[in-house]
Image (tube, rainbow, N blue to C red):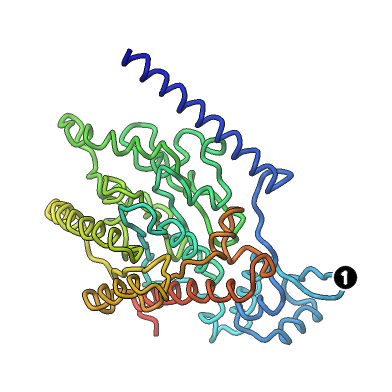
Amino acid sequence: MDNISVSTTDVRIERHANQLSRQLKLLRDKLFPPLSQKTLRTFSSGEAAQMIGVSDGYLRQLSLDGKGPQPELSQNGRRSYTLGQINELRHYMAKLKPKDALSYLPWRRPGEKLQTVAVTNFKGGSAKTTTTLYLAQYLALAGYRVLAIDLDPQASLSSMLGVQPEFDLSDGDTLYGAIRYDAGRKPLKDIVRKTYFDGLDLVPGNLELMEFEHETPRALNDRQKPAELFFRRVGVAIAEVEAEYDVVVIDCPPQLGYLTLGAVCAATSLLITIHPQMVDVASMSQFLLMTSDLLSVVRKAGGDLQHDFIKYVVTRHEPFDAPQSQIVALLRSLFGDDVLTATILKSTAIADAGLTKQTLFEIEKGQVRRSTYDRALESVNAANGEVLAGIHKAWGRT
């Protein structure tokens, strides 16, 4: 009887999984025809000018003089630019005014090390993936070369960036392909893929990543073939492509396993997301205690645990909720400046954009109420601006 029950449940769950996967593929085909690929909206000349750091009039004159990439003209004469064209204009301005090159093209300079930001928390619902996605897109919009790594087997980050794990990936197409222990290991550059978001590349994730959690204990116990220490493998893989990027942002899995430890050891900084509810704070307390214990073992084994900064990010915050305000105040009293000053608000604008696998950076402003959009985007930009300030400080920039 038990065997029949287990078999029936197994078959039922498999059927449900296949049904849901097919429906998600149909939804993607409907949302992103004809080739089921996401595209990024264009930006008005005013938006482009603000992103580059010039006046709209200056940008218009460049267009009239035939200098730089030419914008798309609407029937009423309005100009719009793709993100790729905006980045071309950044290069153009950097060459035109070399003394101000850094303000137009903020790529890291010789001597400025690659910044790897690991976003982590082992409790679900803390907006870890959303925080990772918005940070990666924010940095790309600001002109940085960004690599996003999806280390979560659930692969929500990959899905938001236009990759459907069940259909778009083959064996070895995740970071696992670059950190596995057998002969199937391949260079990370062969796994990185461009996204529709110019300046933002992706190492996607799927359930294959769980293989690393299963294989690492066997590799550690195999005395015949001593493997490279597991906590260094993520960092070694990233080092293969570090010349191509300014910042790497890692979405860690919601568990404290080998993948998360590898990401923490590879990172130059940590962002710990926290939803200001007492149950989440209690969970984070356990997370921090476990992390401390495990990292002390890693440090004794030779792991490099020097981070430029560790910040707590309050997410899904409702500032007029009295209990949440008390928890945020508690966090600030305990951790001081390690808690970002800005909090990421809980917003219907963020949720509504997510329904179509988009962010506030991607949707047209008219899709949600203007005041809601502006308020949510202001909170996101403020938090990400603080993270960028930390990166600049690590680079020695003022």
Asked if 299 appears above or below 99 in the picture, the reply is above
Q: Residue at x 39, y 18 (%)?
A: 7
Residue projecting furthest to the right? 75
The residue carrying mark 1 is 75
Q: Nearer the viewer, residue 309 or 94?
A: 309
Give the crowd class for mark 1: few <14, some 14-19, many >=20 residues within 10 Å.
few
Quadrant position of the C terminus in the picture: bottom left
Asked if 285 appears above or below 234 in the picture, the reply is below
What x and y, as percent, mark residue 229? 22, 45
Q: Residue at x 44, y 36 (%)?
A: 172
Callout 1, which amino acid?
Gln
Q: Nearer the viewer, residue 126 or 172?
A: 126
Asked if 151 appears above or below 137 in the picture, the reply is above
What x and y, as percent, mark residue 181? 31, 35
Disc 1, SS: loop
Query: Where on the picture, by quarter, is residue 387?
Result: bottom left
Query: Where on the picture, by quarter, is residue 220?
Result: top left
Quadrant position of the N terminus in the picture: top left
Relative side of 364 to 148, left or right:
right
Q: Nearer the viewer, residue 388 or 372?
A: 372
Q: Residue at x 66, y 80 (%)?
A: 49
Relative side of 243 to 322, left or right:
right
What x and y, as percent, mark residue 178? 39, 42
Query: Where on the picture, by quarter, is residue 373?
Result: bottom right
